[in-house]
């Protein structure tokens, strides 16, 4: 006979089940697999720990065959988790574990310093939430500081796992400021401390990185350092003395530990200010006498007129080396140039098709040639096809194309020839660089002109060619100086006023009209205060009370008014920025230059062949400083 089993209380059943569950949990824990991996992080980004939870049921009878009761709870089995995480630059830590024992959604949470967060499955970062069977659990923490320790705890159901995050040394970061302009000046010492451009962060707290710890080198981008410049690798100081006007770019590298900062910098070397004592603008070029007696020329190199020994265009002032430092005055003409030396002799160079060099030939010369028989020269002026010189002892000599000499004949002269009827001292003489007639002002205050007269520019009331000097009688006062364009003439009177006559295209006479005039007319606004005048091919300029006014054609920015339109009303107007401080002016065929009272030279106008002299070849409709 089989006896029934005695009745077992419910509490005893529960005790047995709990014991079996504990035994099963220990066995599962022994089989758990811990996986660790690393990914790249920066301190400002969170490090992540990945936890995956998986649910399974347990057989209360221990067999799992359905003969016992299934008991479900939200308490996972023991899960593995790192206790200390070393968080360092360039490294990240991750850990995965399998959480068992979850059959219903179970609460997961995190607490600790540094505001740690959880991401459950694909959710956003939260402090806690419900995790279901098989979902990934990610722990995220952004450490607020370097070289610190942060404690946190992950809890799933009733199982808690504390861990510690230790942050490493802050990685070094180096940045170099983007500086738009670094300037140097030719022939002046230059020094630049690159540390001033560096921003450095990171390194150990006890010994943080800073610009003084950097080592320096030149990178591959840009060009190599120019010969005049050197870099001290330990101090980051660039130094040297530039020898010429130039712009150069190069890459600088600042390095410390495993970090570097890079930046390409450009140094613009400004040339020496052109300090001239006299300047002459010709046909798309110019020449100046320097304070040391040397001559510099720039612009169109046709026929070698810039004195460089070639026909190359010159975009910045360059020495006429063959003249030495012995020049007193220079004149730029159409395609030839002449200079008066300190011993009162003359040298000329450039085109010589009409004998305008005065050396008895018609052979062009790229180098200065000496004129024989001229040892007493005061001033010289080069025109388009002829040249004239005034003598200290009185009188004028000219040479070149026929009819321009003033000797009463239409003949050409290849050597200096005396102008008829002039024996007295001449204080001013003018020929346009593109013109063919000549005017002078004598010491006695008379104006005399000769040559072509198509538009009445001789002032004799008709258009007949004049082969000998004609004396003006209708100027209303004594003349201080003269200036002639291609087809008109102007006189500066002793009372500081200006009168002009001849052709009047684009207001060339400055009287507000455009009609030609055989007789002198007043230039508007120039009734007094004028100290000097100069005329180009189609425009005229006058210094008045140290300000500069110009008038006439402006197709290339000749007038310096900021554009290419003639002045409103065709009258003299102030050149932009030159209402004062002007010592003298020289007008050429398409551009103009002025010497400043305070020193320096400003030029403007046509510049395609470098005749402004600023090194750019870009037309300038307002004055720019000239350096070399």
Image: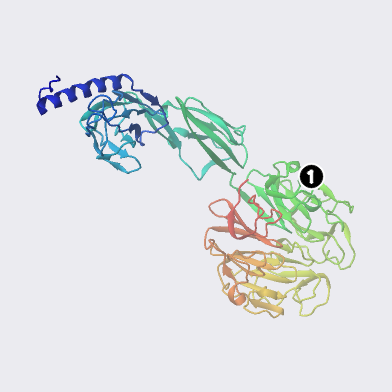
Q: Is residue 44 above or below residue 317?
A: above
Pointer 1 residue: 309
Q: Position of residue 556 (x, y in %)?
A: 67, 64
For the point 70% across and 68% down, which residue is it? 538
Q: Is residue 310 above or below residue 51?
A: below
Q: Quadrant of residue 621?
A: bottom right
Quadrant location of the N terminus in the rendered image = top left
- Going by the image, does 290 lie left or right of 27? right
Q: Is residue 169 above or below residue 284?
A: above
Q: Nearer the viewer, residue 612 or 132?
A: 132
Q: Position of residue 173 (x, y in %)?
A: 42, 32
Q: Secondary structure at mark 1?
A: loop
**What colouring style does the render use?**
rainbow
- Going by the image, does 259 lie left or right of 76? right
Q: Position of residue 444 (x, y in %)?
A: 69, 67
Quadrant location of the C terminus in the rendered image = top right
Q: Report whether residue 500 is seen.
A: no
Q: Nearer the viewer, residue 332 or 169?
A: 169
For the point 42% across and 31% down, which residue is it? 40
Crowd around label 1: few <14 · some 14–19 · many ≥20 (10 Å):
some
- Going by the image, does 268 lie left or right of 14? right
């Amino acid at each position: 006979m089989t006896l029934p089993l005695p009745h077992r209380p419910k509490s005893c059943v529960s005790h047995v089940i709990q014991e079996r569950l504990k035994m099963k949990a220990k066995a599962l824990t022994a089989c758990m697999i811990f996986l660790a991996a690393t990914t790249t992080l920066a301190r400002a980004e969170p490090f992540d720990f990945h936890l995956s939870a998986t649910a399974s049921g347990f057989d209360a009878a221990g067999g799992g065959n359905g003969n016992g009761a299934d008991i479900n709870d939200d308490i996972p089995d023991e899960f593995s988790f790192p206790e200390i995480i070393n968080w360092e630059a360039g490294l990240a830590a991750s850990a995965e574990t399998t959480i068992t024992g979850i059959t219903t959604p179970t609460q997961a949470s995190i607490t600790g310093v540094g505001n740690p967060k959880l991401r459950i499955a694909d959710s956003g970062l939260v402090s806690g939430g419900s995790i279901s069977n098989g979902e990934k659990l990610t722990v995220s923490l952004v450490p607020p500081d370097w070289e610190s320790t942060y404690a946190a705890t992950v809890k799933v159901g009733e199982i808690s796992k504390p861990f510690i995050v230790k942050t490493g040394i802050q990685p070094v970061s180096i940045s170099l400021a983007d500086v738009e302009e670094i300037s140097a000046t030719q022939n002046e010492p230059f020094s630049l401390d690159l540390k001033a451009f560096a921003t450095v962060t990171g390194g150990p707290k006890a010994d943080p990185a800073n610009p003084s710890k950097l080592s320096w080198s030149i990178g591959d981008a840009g060009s190599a350092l120019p010969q005049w410049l050197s870099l001290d690798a330990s101090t980051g100081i660039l130094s040297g003395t530039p020898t010429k006007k130039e712009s150069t770019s190069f890459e600088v590298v600042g390095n410390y530990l495993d970090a570097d900062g890079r930046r390409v910098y450009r140094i613009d070397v400004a040339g020496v200010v052109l300090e001239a004592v006299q300047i002459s603008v010709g046909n798309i070029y110019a020449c100046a006498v320097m304070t040391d007696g040397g001559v510099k020329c720039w612009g169109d190199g046709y026929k070698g007129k810039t004195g460089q020994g070639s026909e190359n265009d010159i975009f910045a002032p360059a020495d006429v080396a063959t003249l030495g430092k012995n020049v007193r005055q220079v004149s730029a003409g159409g395609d030839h140039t002449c200079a008066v030396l300190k011993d009162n002799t003359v040298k000329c160079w450039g085109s010589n098709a009409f004998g305008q060099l005065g050396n008895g030939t018609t052979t062009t010369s790229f180098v200065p040639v000496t004129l024989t028989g001229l040892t007493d020269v005061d001033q010289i002026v080069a025109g388009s096809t002829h040249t004239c010189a005034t003598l200290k002892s009185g009188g004028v000599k000219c040479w070149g194309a026929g009819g321009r000499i003033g000797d009463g004949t239409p003949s050409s002269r290849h050597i200096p020839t005396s102008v008829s009827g002039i024996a007295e001292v001449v204080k001013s003489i003018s020929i346009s660089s593109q013109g063919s007639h000549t005017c002078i002002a004598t010491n006695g205050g008379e104006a005399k002109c000769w040559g072509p007269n198509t538009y009445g520019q001789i002032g004799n009331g008709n258009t007949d060619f004049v082969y000998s000097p004609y004396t003006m009688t209708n100027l209303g006062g004594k003349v201080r100086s003269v200036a002639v364009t291609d087809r008109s003439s102007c006189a500066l009177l002793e009372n500081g006023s200006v009168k002009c006559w001849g052709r009047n295209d684009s207001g060339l006479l400055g009287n507000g009209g455009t009609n030609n005039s055989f007789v002198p007319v007043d230039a508007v606004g120039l009734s007094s205060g004028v100290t000097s005048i100069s005329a180009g091919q189609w425009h005229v300029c006058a210094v008045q009370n140290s300000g500069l006014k110009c008038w006439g054609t402006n197709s290339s920015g000749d007038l310096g008014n900021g554009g290419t339109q003639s002045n409103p009303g065709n009258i003299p107007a102030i050149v932009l920025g030159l209402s004062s401080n002007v010592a003298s002016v020289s007008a050429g065929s398409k551009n103009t230059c002025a010497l400043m009272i305070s020193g320096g030279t400003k030029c403007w106008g046509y510049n395609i062949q470098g005749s402004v002299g600023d090194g750019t070849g870009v037309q300038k409709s307002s004055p720019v400083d000239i350096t070399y």
